[in-house]
Protein backbone atom coordinates (compact mmCIF):
# COMPACT_ATOMS: atom_id res chain seq x y z
CA UNK A 1 0.00 0.00 0.00
CA UNK A 2 1.11 3.53 -0.66
CA UNK A 3 1.63 5.56 2.49
CA UNK A 4 -1.13 7.68 4.03
CA UNK A 5 -1.16 11.40 4.84
CA UNK A 6 -2.96 12.74 7.91
CA UNK A 7 -2.77 16.54 8.15
CA UNK A 8 -3.03 17.78 11.75
CA UNK A 9 -5.70 20.42 12.26
CA UNK A 10 -3.81 21.72 15.31
CA UNK A 11 -2.06 24.12 12.94
CA UNK A 12 -5.21 25.02 10.97
CA UNK A 13 -6.80 28.47 11.02
CA UNK A 14 -9.65 27.99 13.49
CA UNK A 15 -11.31 31.19 12.28
CA UNK A 16 -11.61 29.54 8.88
CA UNK A 17 -11.89 25.94 9.94
CA UNK A 18 -14.48 24.92 7.38
CA UNK A 19 -12.25 26.31 4.61
CA UNK A 20 -9.29 24.28 5.90
CA UNK A 21 -11.46 21.14 6.15
CA UNK A 22 -12.54 21.60 2.52
CA UNK A 23 -8.88 22.03 1.54
CA UNK A 24 -8.12 18.60 3.04
CA UNK A 25 -11.23 17.13 1.36
CA UNK A 26 -9.90 18.37 -1.98
CA UNK A 27 -6.32 17.26 -1.36
CA UNK A 28 -4.46 13.96 -1.70
CA UNK A 29 -4.61 13.54 2.08
CA UNK A 30 -6.19 10.34 3.42
CA UNK A 31 -7.27 11.25 6.96
CA UNK A 32 -7.89 14.19 9.27
CA UNK A 33 -5.58 14.14 12.33
CA UNK A 34 -7.21 15.63 15.43
CA UNK A 35 -5.08 16.32 18.52
CA UNK A 36 -6.95 16.27 21.83
CA UNK A 37 -4.94 17.68 24.77
CA UNK A 38 -6.14 17.98 28.36
CA UNK A 39 -3.52 20.15 30.08
CA UNK A 40 -2.61 17.15 32.28
CA UNK A 41 -1.05 14.46 30.12
CA UNK A 42 0.54 17.25 28.10
CA UNK A 43 1.06 20.88 29.16
CA UNK A 44 -1.22 22.28 26.46
CA UNK A 45 -5.02 22.29 26.01
CA UNK A 46 -6.33 22.04 22.45
CA UNK A 47 -10.03 21.54 21.67
CA UNK A 48 -12.89 19.17 22.40
CA UNK A 49 -16.15 17.69 21.18
CA UNK A 50 -17.78 20.70 19.44
CA UNK A 51 -14.78 21.01 17.11
CA UNK A 52 -14.64 17.25 16.43
CA UNK A 53 -18.35 17.29 15.60
CA UNK A 54 -17.86 20.22 13.24
CA UNK A 55 -14.99 18.47 11.49
CA UNK A 56 -17.09 15.30 11.21
CA UNK A 57 -19.95 17.26 9.64
CA UNK A 58 -17.77 18.53 6.78
CA UNK A 59 -15.02 15.92 6.45
CA UNK A 60 -15.19 13.45 3.57
CA UNK A 61 -12.32 11.35 4.97
CA UNK A 62 -11.84 9.37 8.21
CA UNK A 63 -11.08 11.17 11.48
CA UNK A 64 -7.78 10.03 13.03
CA UNK A 65 -8.17 11.14 16.65
CA UNK A 66 -5.03 11.29 18.84
CA UNK A 67 -5.87 11.47 22.54
CA UNK A 68 -3.23 13.14 24.70
CA UNK A 69 -5.34 12.85 27.84
CA UNK A 70 -5.03 10.96 31.13
CA UNK A 71 -7.30 7.95 31.66
CA UNK A 72 -8.88 8.03 28.18
CA UNK A 73 -11.33 5.22 29.09
CA UNK A 74 -13.60 7.92 30.58
CA UNK A 75 -14.35 9.36 27.12
CA UNK A 76 -14.17 6.51 24.59
CA UNK A 77 -17.96 6.49 24.05
CA UNK A 78 -18.00 10.27 23.63
CA UNK A 79 -15.25 10.27 21.01
CA UNK A 80 -17.11 7.55 19.17
CA UNK A 81 -20.32 9.60 19.22
CA UNK A 82 -18.41 12.70 18.09
CA UNK A 83 -17.27 10.85 14.98
CA UNK A 84 -13.82 9.32 15.56
CA UNK A 85 -12.97 6.56 13.07
CA UNK A 86 -9.51 5.81 14.46
CA UNK A 87 -8.97 6.38 18.18
CA UNK A 88 -5.40 6.42 19.47
CA UNK A 89 -4.54 6.44 23.17
CA UNK A 90 -1.12 6.86 24.76
CA UNK A 91 0.60 3.82 26.22
CA UNK A 92 1.73 6.07 29.09
CA UNK A 93 -1.85 7.17 29.90
CA UNK A 94 -3.47 3.72 30.29
CA UNK A 95 -3.36 1.40 33.29
CA UNK A 96 -5.27 -1.35 31.49
CA UNK A 97 -4.35 -0.87 27.85
CA UNK A 98 -5.71 -4.22 26.72
CA UNK A 99 -9.16 -3.39 28.05
CA UNK A 100 -9.01 0.10 26.52
CA UNK A 101 -8.11 -1.30 23.09
CA UNK A 102 -10.91 -3.89 23.23
CA UNK A 103 -13.41 -1.20 24.19
CA UNK A 104 -12.40 1.02 21.25
CA UNK A 105 -12.70 -1.90 18.84
CA UNK A 106 -16.04 -3.04 20.27
CA UNK A 107 -17.51 0.30 19.19
CA UNK A 108 -16.35 -0.28 15.60
CA UNK A 109 -13.42 2.15 15.65
CA UNK A 110 -9.84 1.31 14.71
CA UNK A 111 -7.68 1.22 17.85
CA UNK A 112 -4.28 2.89 18.03
CA UNK A 113 -1.61 3.15 20.70
CA UNK A 114 0.96 5.95 20.80
CA UNK A 115 4.47 5.94 22.26
CA UNK A 116 6.19 9.04 23.63
CA UNK A 117 9.82 9.54 22.54
CA UNK A 118 11.13 7.95 25.78
CA UNK A 119 8.91 4.85 25.64
CA UNK A 120 10.57 1.78 24.09
CA UNK A 121 8.90 -0.22 21.32
CA UNK A 122 9.41 -3.58 23.08
CA UNK A 123 6.74 -2.63 25.65
CA UNK A 124 4.17 -3.30 22.92
CA UNK A 125 5.14 -6.98 22.65
CA UNK A 126 1.99 -8.29 24.36
CA UNK A 127 -0.47 -5.86 22.78
CA UNK A 128 0.78 -5.47 19.21
CA UNK A 129 -1.42 -8.30 17.86
CA UNK A 130 -4.53 -6.48 19.14
CA UNK A 131 -3.93 -2.97 17.80
CA UNK A 132 -4.72 -1.56 14.36
CA UNK A 133 -2.17 1.26 14.49
CA UNK A 134 0.90 2.39 16.42
CA UNK A 135 1.62 6.12 16.53
CA UNK A 136 5.30 6.86 17.12
CA UNK A 137 5.80 10.35 18.56
CA UNK A 138 8.80 12.04 16.97
CA UNK A 139 8.41 15.07 19.28
CA UNK A 140 7.31 15.35 22.88
CA UNK A 141 3.55 15.76 22.47
CA UNK A 142 1.81 19.01 23.30
CA UNK A 143 2.66 21.46 20.54
CA UNK A 144 2.92 21.75 16.80
CA UNK A 145 6.01 23.09 15.09
CA UNK A 146 8.69 21.19 17.06
CA UNK A 147 11.84 19.61 15.71
CA UNK A 148 11.84 15.94 14.60
CA UNK A 149 13.69 13.60 17.00
CA UNK A 150 15.84 11.33 14.75
CA UNK A 151 15.68 8.31 17.10
CA UNK A 152 12.12 7.81 15.81
CA UNK A 153 13.62 6.25 12.66
CA UNK A 154 15.17 3.40 14.69
CA UNK A 155 11.87 2.95 16.52
CA UNK A 156 10.00 2.51 13.23
CA UNK A 157 12.44 -0.22 12.14
CA UNK A 158 12.19 -2.00 15.48
CA UNK A 159 8.39 -1.76 15.41
CA UNK A 160 8.25 -3.10 11.86
CA UNK A 161 10.17 -6.17 13.06
CA UNK A 162 7.91 -6.63 16.09
CA UNK A 163 4.80 -6.40 13.88
CA UNK A 164 6.20 -9.06 11.60
CA UNK A 165 7.36 -11.33 14.46
CA UNK A 166 3.93 -11.21 16.09
CA UNK A 167 2.01 -11.45 12.79
CA UNK A 168 0.20 -8.23 13.64
CA UNK A 169 -1.78 -6.20 11.09
CA UNK A 170 -0.90 -2.92 12.80
CA UNK A 171 0.17 0.00 10.65
CA UNK A 172 2.80 2.52 11.72
CA UNK A 173 2.08 6.26 11.89
CA UNK A 174 4.52 9.01 12.82
CA UNK A 175 3.71 12.36 14.40
CA UNK A 176 5.82 15.45 14.99
CA UNK A 177 8.21 17.54 12.93
CA UNK A 178 7.47 15.77 9.64
CA UNK A 179 8.47 17.79 6.56
CA UNK A 180 10.21 17.56 3.18
CA UNK A 181 13.62 16.96 4.82
CA UNK A 182 12.67 13.71 6.57
CA UNK A 183 9.50 12.27 4.95
CA UNK A 184 11.35 9.98 2.55
CA UNK A 185 13.66 8.59 5.26
CA UNK A 186 10.62 7.93 7.45
CA UNK A 187 8.78 6.04 4.72
CA UNK A 188 11.92 4.11 3.74
CA UNK A 189 12.23 2.98 7.38
CA UNK A 190 8.83 1.26 7.08
CA UNK A 191 6.30 3.88 8.18
CA UNK A 192 2.77 3.70 6.71
CA UNK A 193 1.23 7.05 7.65
CA UNK A 194 2.60 10.58 8.08
CA UNK A 195 1.02 13.22 10.32
CA UNK A 196 1.99 16.77 9.39
CA UNK A 197 0.70 19.97 10.97
CA UNK A 198 2.77 23.10 10.63
CA UNK A 199 4.56 21.91 7.48
CA UNK A 200 1.17 21.73 5.72
CA UNK A 201 -0.69 24.68 7.19
CA UNK A 202 2.19 27.15 7.23
CA UNK A 203 3.03 26.48 3.59
CA UNK A 204 1.89 28.85 0.82
CA UNK A 205 0.29 26.13 -1.30
CA UNK A 206 -1.19 23.57 1.08
CA UNK A 207 -2.56 21.32 -1.66
CA UNK A 208 0.86 21.13 -3.27
CA UNK A 209 2.54 20.48 0.10
CA UNK A 210 0.20 17.54 0.77
CA UNK A 211 0.79 16.27 -2.76
CA UNK A 212 4.54 16.44 -2.15
CA UNK A 213 4.21 14.38 1.04
CA UNK A 214 1.98 11.84 -0.69
CA UNK A 215 4.26 11.38 -3.68
CA UNK A 216 7.54 12.12 -1.86
CA UNK A 217 8.34 14.73 -4.48
CA UNK A 218 9.74 17.98 -3.18
C1 LIG B 1 1.86 17.12 18.81
C2 LIG B 1 0.69 16.62 18.01
C3 LIG B 1 0.94 16.67 16.56
C4 LIG B 1 1.16 18.04 15.99
C5 LIG B 1 2.16 17.87 14.89
O1 LIG B 1 1.64 16.89 20.13
O2 LIG B 1 0.40 15.28 18.35
O3 LIG B 1 -0.07 15.98 15.82
O4 LIG B 1 0.01 18.67 15.50
O5 LIG B 1 2.54 19.12 14.47
P1 LIG B 1 3.84 19.31 13.58
O6 LIG B 1 3.65 18.53 12.32
O7 LIG B 1 3.85 20.80 13.35
O8 LIG B 1 5.03 18.84 14.38
ZN1 LIG C 1 -0.99 14.15 16.97
Image: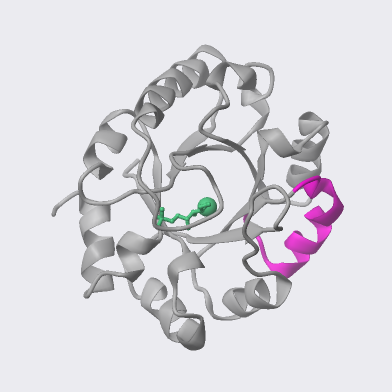
Kindly indicate the quadrant of the structure image that contains residue 20. bottom left
Can the viewer see residue 152?
A: yes
Start-end of magenta stretch: 70-86
Query: Outermost residue, right direction?
Result: 74
Question: Which SS does the magenta portion mostly show?
Answer: helix
Q: Quadrant of the C terminus?
A: bottom left
Q: Residue at x 68, y 24 (%)?
A: 127
Q: Nearer the viewer, residue 182 or 157?
A: 182
Q: Where is residue 170 in the image (x, y as percent from the top left)?
A: 54, 32
Residue 80 in the magenta stretch? The answer is yes
Residue 10's place in the image compared with 69, above or below, is: below
Left-right relation of 124 to 3? right
Residue 58's place in the image compared with 31, above or below, is: below
Residue 171 in the magenta stretch? The answer is no
Query: Outermost residue, front direction?
Result: 43
Left-right relation of 130 to 207? right
Q: Quadrant of the N terminus?
A: top left
Count the marks: how many? 0
Amino acid sequence: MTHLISPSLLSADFGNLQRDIEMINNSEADWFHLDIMDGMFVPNISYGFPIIQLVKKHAKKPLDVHLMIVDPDRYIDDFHKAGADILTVHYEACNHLHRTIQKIKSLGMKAGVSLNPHTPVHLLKDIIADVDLVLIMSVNPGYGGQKFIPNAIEKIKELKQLISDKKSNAIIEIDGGVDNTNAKTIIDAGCDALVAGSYVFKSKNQLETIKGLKNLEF
